[in-house]
Amino acid sequence: MPRIKALTTGTIPSFLDAILNIAESDTSSSLDFHDNWVHQLKKANKTMYFFGDDTWIRLFPGLFDKTDGTTSFYVSDTVQVDLNVSRHIQQDIAKERWDVLIMHYLGLDHIGHLGGPNSPLMQPKQREMDEAIESIFDIVSKQDAERLVSDPKAKGTLIVICGDHGMNDNGNHGGSSTGETSTALVFLSPQFQSRPHFKQAKSTKRSTVFGYPVIDQIDLVPTLASLFSFPIPRNNLGRVITDLLKEEDTTSLLRALQLNAFQLAQLLEKMIPTVQKYIREPHLYLDDNASLHGKLYARATVLFEQYLSTQVQQTAHDAIVLFNEFIDLTQSELANIASDYKLSYMILGTMLIISSAILFCVWHYQARYKTDQVWKLNWYFSIVFLGAYSISMFASSYVEEEHVTWFYFLQTFILLGVVQSLYTVYSSSKFTIYSAILCFLQLVTVRLAVGWNRGLSSMLLHYISPWHLVALTLGTTVALAAKNVIELGKTQTEDVYQPANVILNISKVFYLSVISFCSVLVLVYKIRSDPTAAGHDGNTMKSVPELYQGLLNMELVKPLDQVQLGRLIYNYGATALFVLCALRYITRKVKLINLEDNRSFGNDNSRLVELLLHTATPLLILLSGTHNAALFLVFYLHYHIFKLWQQYLIEINRLSVSTLAIMMTCLCHASFFMTGHSNSLASVDLSNAYVGVQGYDTLLIGALTFISNWSASVWWVFASWSLIADSCATIDIPKRWVMFIITQSVFFSVALSFLSISVTILREHLFIWTVFSPKYLYQVAWNCLFHWTVQAFIGSLFLVFICNNTID
């Protein structure tokens, strides 16, 4: 949507447009009150058709005489989304009842999101686009030829082929890399003389960086206005593409530049009121040095008038040079004020955020000395860590490379655990070494996870099929779930009656059956979703090991498409959660409760929460990239090592909840970057945000997009719940949980406070829109969606359910 806005209005999109782009049903993004060439053509009574991305229909409601929209965010569809557009080539273009026709294809964009620029679907799709363009050109050529027979002065049809954005190496976009911001622009017409632009040598100069002329997207707007003789949209910041005009038609070239300069001068007048006199009476201010803008405009205008009278080419050349200088200077001035904001609102919001951070700090300070025993070394380092992280929000380089910060702090905290173990006076040297070894193993697993998306996975996949890694991870999940289910309910004293064991065992078997089959379906979905492993019809290909051929040909899944299969997985996941809740009830209902020992349910609490982790893992793998599935295996290894270390420290009463909260904060953030994400909007992965979804729903797609991109962090949220419930009495869980949430709330509130101060102070910074604004958007997602929604709200609901001992 931001790019379409730039292509039609000539304005620079604001950062808010990137947010409104996600809310497909949002009507505030309409361009009803923005001057654009679509409105201008409609005012000229042109018949306009549109086929393709329905964003255009939302931006220009009621302007098109015929439409056929396709959903732009349903990236799983790479075939039908383009067939719905191409079918109109013969149906509508050939009938010649239109004046303007806009066709927006989405298939290439969707393939990029799914598999990147090197996807095996990319070249066939490009050939499909070539054939579509060829068909359109042939039809238009025939129509133009027939029109010229009846009217020799008839004008030809112009075909404009352009992309709204490019993509990075992962197939995403939204950043500022060359691949994301560079797209092709081609003007075709049967009436054009053969004037190809020969490719020049590449250079560092922007004008020939690719060997071809480079323009801005907004330059298309005044160019179309010049070619079709309609007014340039009033807020346009683009410049006319003079390469399209014939060199011998100097008058037309100067007229196009004069109109472009006049429109920009009117915009500049709002910022510099004195420019008005130069526009109205240019002859009086030819030598006035008070305003460079006005002087350039006045001289260029007068020279243009002289050329019209004398037809002296040198006069025309001088006028062209002055017009270009004025347009360059005015563009840079207007671009600086294109992004408007209210400073008073920013300061007010920042003050409110700072106030909440202070309240959480005071709350934590009071609660810490009442309920918590804190490691002094870790506590002091935590303060240093929070201060250093907050200060880093003022440096663009640290924001861009934030993953390094989290990797460093995570490993440092673990290393401090080794130091703390060596200075523990409550245990023997044997247990001290045991604790140090566990910390060292955690460092090893962190190193594996850090390197996974930095070459380790690529190297490993040369020797092992990715499906083996996915199957191993899912199999491990089921095995660990089986271990916890078998041990569930063994801590109580005796059965109330014999049939209770039968009910409990049936429930356990049913849960394991559901979670096992859910994991199998996730594996099938992953294999079928890979274009190198399965066709769109679900037929297996040779790249799939024979071990999994039988799974793909199961009678249950063979007739299902991917959407139906995804919904089936969700159903099994919900069933597993329901059975897990039933297991919680049954284990409490059918066993005698020792009311004097609240630890009688302590182990079962931990197992139930850990079973929730095992239940969620297949779904999180489903919504993650296939190459990241094995990361969850590494996470499992780290989790169990950390759990052993925590149990050892709890035995000697040396682990504080605050320390656990800080460690989990580091793990959640570090795992986000371990999966290949960053603070750039280009790293937002949409390829797994449509699992089991047929159409587009803002809330549903938004939730799936969040979970698919934060899947590793959400996994550690579930793991943290299990660690809180581990090895403590049921009555202690609420106390530990409150302290846990308060500690993390301090971090998130302080981080957002300093970031808010940063973007307010650095609002004029060169990288405010490319670095700091995306980071702020990510931080809002961390605070609102991750911390308060998933961690605090959902976590509180589940732990309250687990800790409720009352049986009605």
Image (spheres, rainbow, N blue to C red):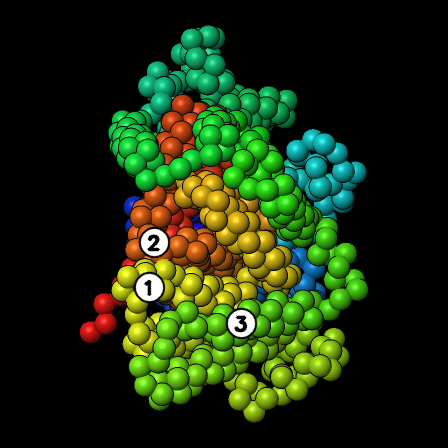
Image location of residue 470, percent across then percent down: 63, 68
Residue 111, image x and y in percent? 60, 63
The amino acid marked with disc number 2 is Ile
Q: Earlier in the sequence, mark 3 or mark 1?
A: 3
For label 3, the SS is helix
**Left or right: 646 in relation to 532:** left
Which residue is pictured at 51% across the width and 23% down the height?
Answer: 329
Q: Distance of mark 1 from mark 2, alpha carbons? A: 10 Å
Residue sitting farthest toward the left: 808
Q: Which mark is residue 483?
A: 3
Q: Which residue is located at x 76 percent, y 45 percent?
A: 198
Q: Earlier in the sequence, mark 1 or mark 2?
A: 2
Is residue 631 in sight in this rendering? no
Which residue bears the numbered disc 1? 802
The residue furthest bottom is: 555
User: Which three-letter amino acid code belongs to the residue tagged 1?
Assistant: Ile
Report x, y in % for residue 652.
Answer: 48, 44
Element carrying mark 2: helix
Q: Nearer the viewer, residue 447 or 640?
A: 640
Q: Is residue 715 above or below residue 490?
A: above
| Residue wearing tag 2 | 733
* Label 3 to label 1: alpha-carbon separation: 19 Å
